[in-house]
Image: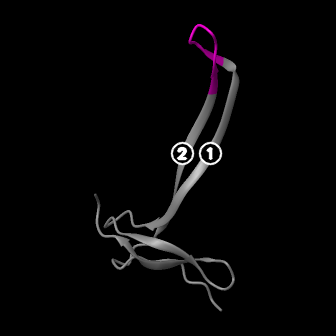
């Protein structure tokens, strides 16, 4: 099966957008100050979407049977 890159309804190629949050944990000392040496840093992925840089439409990310990204249905129309 030949792969076709995801395309917007306006015919522009879509890009993958990954929404992540960086989180950092700090210990607090007895004086109420943060202890920087005890930093724990991690990322959480909250969602992905295929986005059009031309018209602003976003689409649900789906995968074909070979686990390649394909475009799903419209998630949001136009720029916010």
What residue lies at 65% left-to-right and 41% top-to-bottom?
A: 42
- Residue 19 within the magenta-colored segment of the rendering: no
- Residue 34 within the magenta-colored segment of the rendering: yes
Q: Which is nearer the eye, 65 or 26?
A: 26
Q: Which residue is the extreme one toward the front? A: 30
Q: Quadrant of residue 52?
A: bottom left
64 left or right of 51 in image: right
Please give the label number shown on residue 21: 2
Q: Residues within 10 Å of mark 1 (few under 14, many from 20)?
A: few
Q: Which residue is mark 1?
A: 43
Q: Which is nearer the eye, 51 or 42?
A: 42
Q: Quadrant of the C terminus?
A: bottom left
Q: Marks 1/2: CA distance?
A: 6 Å
Q: Residues within 10 Å of mark 2 (few under 14, many from 20)?
A: few
In this view, 80 is above or below 39: below
- State if disc 2 and disc 1 touch (CB < 8 Å): yes
Q: Is residue 9 visible to us here?
A: yes
51 left or right of 4 in image: left
Q: Position of residue 12 (x, y in %)?
A: 40, 73
Q: Earlier in the sequence, mark 1 or mark 2?
A: 2
Q: Position of residue 54 (x, y in %)?
A: 34, 65
Please give the label number shown on residue 20: none
66 left or right of 57 in image: right
What residue lies at 28% left-to-right and 66% top-to-bottom?
A: 78
Which span of residues is magenta-colored? 26-35
Label 1, secondary structure: give it. Answer: strand
Q: Position of residue 26 (x, y in %)?
A: 63, 25
Q: Position of residue 66 (x, y in %)?
A: 69, 83
What residue lies at 31% left-to-right and 67% top-to-bottom?
A: 55
């Amino acid at each position: 099966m030949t792969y076709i890159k995801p395309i917007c309804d306006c015919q522009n190629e879509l890009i993958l957008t990954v929404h992540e949050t960086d989180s950092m944990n700090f210990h607090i000392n007895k004086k109420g100050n943060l202890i920087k040496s005890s930093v724990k840093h991690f990322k959480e992925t909250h969602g992905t979407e295929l986005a059009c840089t031309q018209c602003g439409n976003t689409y649900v990310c789906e995968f074909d049977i070979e686990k390649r990204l394909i475009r799903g249905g419209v998630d949001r129309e136009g720029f916010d």
